[in-house]
Amino acid sequence: MTLPLAPPVAPQLAKSARDLPVGDGWIYEPKWDGFRVIAFVDGDDVYLQSRGSRPLSRYFPEIVPPPGRYVLDGEIVVLDGEGRPEFEQLQQRLHPAASRVQRLAAEIPATLIAFDLLAQDDDDLCGLPFAERRARLAAIGDGALRLTDSTTDPAEAAVWLDTIEGVIAKDLAAPYRPGKRLGMVKVKKVRTVDCVVVGYREGVEPGTVGSLILGLYSPAGELWVVGHSSGFGAKQKRDLLAVVQPHASGDRGTADPSRWSAGRELEWVGLRPELVVEVAFDHASSGRIRHGARLLRFRDDKAPAECVMEGESPFA
């Protein structure tokens, strides 16, 4: 490839915020639940780079951007019939067998959604304002690229917070800063749920709790593991052990291994279903909290039996 930018290029990142920034200088985009990708296109030659600078092209042979010479920033997603991302389906696409990759490309095809243009022909565009980069992106391939939705109306963007994972706000005048959390703001939809603490994983340091295992009762009365809560401070890790140990059941549990958890300690100490916690989370799918949940408080005022799924999932 003879492009003005060569892999690896670190994608620009967003700074987290509780509220959307407002003003004439902002534009808003939906936050897609997929794999961040930097796509390098030189004629018919395409190289897809992950956020962590790993090659993705072999897993997504069906992604063929329009020919040209350019570098774009985007997201690889698998969409359901209503256009919503299905992250679990996307994860299945990372398979080592070439024959399986080809079959999955036909059965659960992925889509590239573009949202920024970093280079075109012999020009590095990173120093240009986002507004100009976005306009040039829209013209690639005579509009053949699928561009992310966008709006300059914060009220319209706020609706996305009720329907999707979150919103990305971008400064229209900002240059592209690889690897920096500047010029972009991320606001996620945050929800809460009360869960039964069914176990805990021991922390790396002796005498500490690394994570709490969370459960909910099905309508039939079965207690199902729906996720975990972690990210505790050093003192909280020590204090939590004294809270949970009196409820130890003597059982052990384990999470199913996956390509994402290879080499990690997955066994946890079982607890009697007596503790209830309120946790905050920003995304859930297939009846499970994704990315972990944040512990808000213990709820001594609520009985564990009241922590029941509504229908098949509490996260619909």
Image: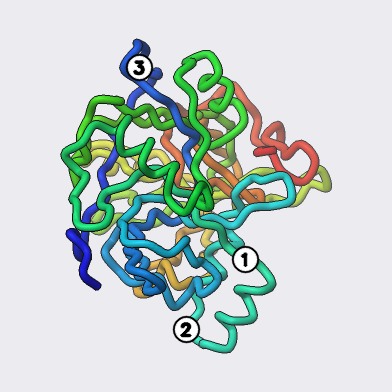
Category of crowding for the residue at label 3, using alpha-carbon neighbours closer than 10 angstroms: few (below 14), some (14–19), many (at least 20): some
Report the mark closest to the observer, 3 or 2. 3
Is mark 1 in CB contact (under 8 Å) with mark 3? no
Judged left or right of residue 227, residue 24 is left
Residue type at numbered disc 3: Pro
Please state if 190 lies on the left or on the right of 55 as rendered: right
Foreground pick, 178 / 284: 178
- Is residue 180 among the parts visible in the rendering? yes
Q: 209 and 65: which one is in front? A: 65
Task: Count neighbours of disc 2 (C-alpha within 10 A) and say few if under 14, some if 14 to 19, many if 20 or more.
Answer: few
Q: Quadrant of the C terminus?
A: top right
CA distance separating discs 1 and 2:
17 Å
Which residue is tagged 1? Answer: 109
Q: Amino acid at mark 1?
A: Pro
Residue hosting label 2? 96
Vertical placement of residue 118 versus 266, above or below: above
- Local packing at callout 1 (Cα closer than 10 Å; few below 14, some 14-19, many 20+) is some
Q: Mark 1 to mark 3: distance in Å?
A: 35 Å
The answer to whether 195 is drawn above or below residue 261 in the figure is above
Task: Judge left or right: residue 303 versus residue 231.
Answer: right
Check disc 2 and give the amino acid type. Answer: Pro
Q: Is residue 141 above or below residue 274?
A: below
Residue tagged 3: 21
Q: Nearer the viewer, mark 1 or mark 2?
A: 1
* Identity of the residue drawn at 65% across and 30% down: 303
- Residue 212 appears in the figure: no
